[in-house]
Structures are given as C-alpha cells and as structure tokens.
Image: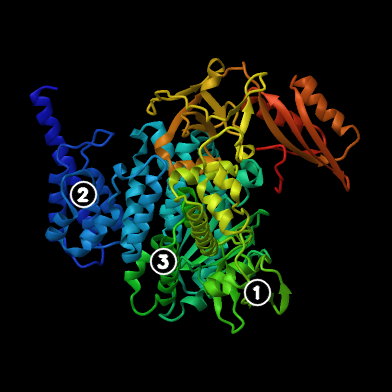
Amino acid sequence: MTDEEILARDQQDEKLVNDAFQELLERYLETKHRKKVEIITKAFRFAKQAHKGIRRKSGEPYILHPIAVARIACCEIGLGSTSICAALLHDVVEDTDYTVEDIQNLFGDKIAQIVEGLTKISSGMFTGQTSAQAENLKKLLLTMNEDIRVILIKIADRLHNMRTLGSMAANKQYKIAGETLYIYAPLANRLGLNRIKTELEDLSFAYEHPEQYKEIQEKLASTQVDRDNLFSEFTEPVRKMLDQMGFQYHLLARIKSPYSIWQKMQKKHINFDEVYDLLAVRIIFKPRTPDSEESDCFAIYLGLSRLYKEHPERLRNWISQPKANGYRALHVTLMSGKGRWVEVQIRSEKMDDLAEQGFAAHWKYKEGAVGEEESELTKWLKTIKEILADPQPSAMDFLDTIKMNLYSSEIIVFTPKGEIITMPQNCTALDFAFSIHTFLGSHCIGAKVNHKLVPMSHKLQGGDQVEILTSNSQKVQPSWLDIATTAKAKAKIDSILRKERREYIQKGEDTLRTFLKEAGYELTDAHLRTLTTAHGLSNSDEFLLQIGRGIVTLIQADIDTLAPKRKGNTGWKKFIPFNLAGNSNTMKPIVPPTPVVRDIDKKKVFKVTPEDKASYIIADCCKPIPGDDVLGYIDNDNRIIIHKRQCSIATQLKNSFGDRLLAVEWETGRAMDFPVYLYIKGLDNIGMLNKVTQVISADHNMNMQRMNIIVNDGIFEGRIQALVHDVKDVAQLSRHLKEIPGLTQVVRLESFEEVFNG
C-alpha cells in the first residue's frame, strides 16, 4: 500500500471507531442508569490506545470488538457503566503489556476485579494433558461467584465472537461453536437471557451444520405465509377479548428457532413437516392496577379457554412457582379453528423484561420484588462454588459436572414439612437427599415418597413429598454415580469416593514402607515401579490402593523380586505381561508402541481419501460416513480420529481440547464402503420382510451384514446393518423403504445395538 492509501485507511478506521463509540454512548444515555459518561470515555480512550495498530482476523481495528461487547452488555443485557468499562477493557490485560494493577490504579478495584475475571490464564502454564479451556472456565466461574457481571460480560463477548466467527479457520469455528453450544448457551439460559441463548444456539448450529441450517431457514421462509395466516386468524378473537377486558397489550408471533427445530427433528426422528409447534403466540400486557399482575394473567387465561379448547396436559404455571432462572409466565396450548395446536404465552411487561434480559434486568424492579429470583440465583451460585471447591480431576468430568448444573427443566417437590425444593427433571431420591445436605445424601438408604417406601434410585415427579431415610452404617458406593443425575450429587459422591481412595492409598503406602523397612529396603520410586509391574498392574496408585484395601498381601516373593538377579530366582515373573514374538518360544516383555510422529497443519483442511487409510481412524462411538458433518481430533499418539460434529465425545473434545481439532472433508467418492444402521417400523403385513430385503439387496445392490426382526401385536420392528458409500445412499434407501405399504418409520441409528425410543 502507498503512504496515501495507508493514510486514507487510517482516517476511515478512525471515523469507524469514533462513530461506533458515539453510538454506544447514545444508547447508554437512553437507559435509566446513572449517566457516568466520563469514566466510560476514559476507558474507551485507554483501550483504544492499548489496542492501537492491532486488527482482528476480519481486518477491522481490534477496538471495534470491545466496543461491540460493551454495546451488547448495555443494550441487550441491560448492564451499567461499571460493566461497560470492564467490557471496553476486557482484552487489555490479556493482549497487551498492561497489567491488572494498571487497570486498578486507573479505574478502581471493581472494574479491575471484573477484567481480571475475564482474562484467560496463559496457555504456557498448561501441560499437554491439561485442558486450558476447562481451567479458564473454572477461573471464570470462580470470579463469577464474586461478581455475576463477569459471566454476563463473557456471554456478551462470546455473542460478538459468534456473530463474527466467519473470519476464523474452520477448526477454530468448530471449537468455538462447540463450547458455545455446550456451555455458554446453557449459561445464558440459566441466567434468564433467553434471546441471547437462542441466538448463540442458532449461530453455533449454522457453523456446525451449515447445510441443515440453510435447509431449515429455507423451509421456514417457504411456510411463512401459512403461519402468518394462522396467527392472524387465531389472534383476531383474542384481540377483541383483550380490548373488552380493558388491557393495554401487544401480541407477538414467536417462531421456533432453527436449532430448536433441528433438535426436535433429531430427537423425535421426524422431518420438518412433522414439527407442528413452529408457531407460538405471546401476549404481553400492562397490568390494569399495580397489584393485579398475577390475577390479570389468570383472567386472560380464563378468557382464552372460553374462546378455544385447551390441551388438558399442556398448562404450564410458572407464575406461582417461577423457573430456577427467574422466568415467570403462563403457558397454555389451544386448538385453533384450523385444527392445529397453538401455544399461547401470557406475560406482563415486567415478566417479559425478566424473560429476555434475565437477572441483569432486575435493576429496573428493585422495590423488594426480586427476592425469589435473587435467592434462586444465590442458590445456583452456591452450588457452582461447591463444585469448584472440590473439582473433578479430569477436564471432561469437570465440564460435564458444570453442564449438568445448567438444567432448564425443573420440577417442584416438597419436604416432609411442606417446604418447596426445585429439582431438575428425572432426578432421583438420592439427588434430593444430597440437595438437602451432604450428610443426608451420604447416609441415604432409601426414601418415602408420598408416604410409600422407595429405593434411592426412584425418579421423582412434580408434586412429590419426599422423606429421606438414613443409616449411620451406610457408606457411599461407586454405583451411586449411576443413580445420581444432578451435578451436586455426582460431585459430592465423587469427592467422597476420591477422599476414601486417597486414604486407602496412604494406608497402602504406609503398609508397604513398613514391610520394606523390615526387609532392609527403602520405599523408592524404582522399587514401587518394580513391585507394581510384578503384580500385573500398570499404575502405582492402583497397587497401593489394593494393598490398603487388603486385596494384595505382601509376602517374601515381593522381596525376592527386588533382590539382585541370580540363577534360579524368577521371583514373580509370572505376573509380568509378555507376548510371543513370531513363532519362537522366546518370551519378550510387551513394549508400548512408539507414537507415529507427523507434522499436522491444523489450519489446513484434512482430506479423508481411500488412498490414505492409515492416516485416520473412523470413530467407533458415532461411526460417521461420507456426507456426515465431521471433524478431526489429534490424539496423544498423533492419530487423527474422525467424529461426527454432534457426537457426544466430539462435544467433549471441542470443550476440553479445542486446539487439537481439524477441519475435515470427505473425498472418498464411491470407492469405500461404510456400515450404516437402520431402524424400521411398521404394520406386519404379509411379505413385509421379503419386500424390505428386496429393496436393500436387489433394488439398491447393498450388502446386508446383520438383521434383527421382532413382531409384536401386529407391529413389525427391525434393525439392519448394511454397507453404503455415503449419506446419499442412506437417504435414497430410506425414501424407497418408506414407499413399502405399511412401513411407517426408517431411522438411522449410531449402532446396531442402539435402543430406539422415539
């Protein structure tokens, strides 16, 4: 570029940056917050200077990102000047030479504390086995306990990063989109940021499954007119009713988001045309008197039930008992004049604010009306703090534990004294016990639910009254981890088991040290490794654990193993793992394979080809085939494992080891066969099995490897394993199978053994 071009670009950038900041200030001045323009301007100028000359991947000046994050924090979450300053400064410590102390000296303790919470830990502090993503999330959540604004600004930061993700490399897109869907969208939901949660989900979906996202968007567009007509006809009598009742109100058409539609299609194994709840009607009203908010909700509900027939099982009352994230509304599903079910959501203006901006909106309603919501937030933060105080040893376990705590579907249960406890759906009596107190959970032997004796594994239902039964002799068992469903219960059980394990290991170490000392030996690392191997174990902690538990008894043969080798002394060689080398009778110790060392450019797209089969492995957990949306993961042995992007293992990898991901493209053509698993269901017509095999083997010339057919009460069900080239083969085969009279369902499974519960 010439000097003139550089000058012109810099002038254009300066105008772009100043205009963006001016717009932020104008939007801030429109809020009801105290107008602290001076400190916001000071933070902007400081951040602008700190990031001077730095550009984002998109090519725009870097300072535009902090401005955008500050605007989201202000306009879309409803935060004030402290948060706006922290958002403007949130990358200064991480990306420049300025320190937290510099921020503290210039802007005070509170802003510095928030900025420190938003600053990632240096990647150089982690070993290859440590997940930087998990450790940074842990740090973020720890700071969140001190000031909730930390996580709110982080969500704003993530939202802007997702809105501008297109400039990143594909492997980075999968990492960022994956952890957004797994952690940040549920966090936004848990904090009541419904609109942001939905946008984060849709943006993640668009990057992980672009073709499906585009297809759903196109189908939503093509069915828009039909939904508009339904909304207009359905709401016409509703408007008349609300006018007659004297309400000030507005009606909104809420369309199911692309990600929610796709999720339902995947879960129910249905196509777009079978998703019937695309449209919901939202009634947002102004209470007729200051104290009539709740009674007005029920008055509107009664009026609606006179206009339309309601679904007897679809009334949701979140007025009397709000959701754990503070959401309050009445939901009722009504039968429209066109014979279609329509959900109606009834909210006051205050309820709508809280639904869209969550806990951050509470500054508008400080007159003693937020006790329930704040106490729910406090309880949730306390649970997070308990999990962090006793973290999981594995990064994936830690992320799973946090994820489990972000539940959105709750039930209400009661203590024997009638106290209300909010629990996640599908929780067990054991979960309830741990939610009350760790002692109660760790000594639980069962429960009385509605005065009937049940085991601790009993799943609770909304409205149950639960009394926990305990015994002082009861001890926590490893099998309890399979019974517990909540993050708190699992974390406590795991903590108790790990503490017990550490105690047994220490006991084993003391026993071994005493045993060796009596024989004239010291307990050294070399001696410990030798004895561990001699007992056929690969882990010294496991060896000490077995000594501590009395599983392994130390005898003279152990001392012989440590003694200098002499003729005839084989010690405990029979415990050493060996393998046969060729046809010789010579026994050789097993030697771990040497990892294949290859230079893998993670910025490039990895091609899956028939010629290079040795360079990749198709993951057994999800069995992807050509045409599936996939990614690659570089494991510890430098092998590339190909996973489906929505695979549960891939989800964990995206959130724990995102720096090991690769973008992957299929280039197999029709040269390779891949196993695919199909579930079929229909009426047991005569010749059904013959017709199915005819379509697969004769019409499509596919090789069937396994088939399992069950007929029960005239219903034909089966699982089939066949070889295909790609997803197009699966789609075509599924379409032709559905053309068989009486065959109603054809669903692709991830394994032949998968239990289908659609």
Spatial separation of the CA atoms under disc 2 and disc 3 = 26 Å
3 or 1: mark nearer the eye: 3
Q: Dot 3 lies on which element? A: helix
What residue is rendered at 46% in x and 53% in y? Answer: 393
Quarter holding the N terminus is top left
Task: Give the camera-side residue of 752 and 711.
Answer: 752
User: In this view of the protein, can residue 190 be seen by the observer?
Assistant: yes
Check the image and name the residue furthest to the front: 567
In the rendered image, residue 200, in percent from the top left (x then y), is placed at: 42, 48
Q: Which residue is mark 1?
A: 464
Which amino acid type is marked by label 1? Answer: Asp
What residue is rendered at 80% in x and 20% in y? Answer: 698
Which amino acid type is marked by label 2? Answer: Val
**Image position of 197 with respect to 351: above or below:** above
Q: Which residue is mark 3?
A: 381
Task: Decide if residue 363 is on the left or right side of residue 294.
Answer: left
Task: Decide if residue 664 is on the left or right side of residue 715.
Answer: left
Mark 2 crowdedness (10 Å alpha carbons): few <14, some 14-19, many ≥20: many
Of label 3 and label 1, which has the lower sequence position? 3
Task: Give the camera-side residue of 319 and 181.
Answer: 181
What is the count of numbered marks?
3
Spatial separation of the CA atoms under disc 3 and disc 1 = 26 Å
- Asked where in the image residue 458 lies, by quadrant, the reply is bottom right
Residue 93's disc number: 2
What residue is rendered at 45% in x and 58% in y? Answer: 189
Q: Are marks 2 and 1 in contact (CB under 8 Å)?
A: no
Residue 516's disc number: none
- Asked where in the image residue 548 lies, by quadrant, the reply is bottom right
Of label 2 and label 1, which has the lower sequence position? 2
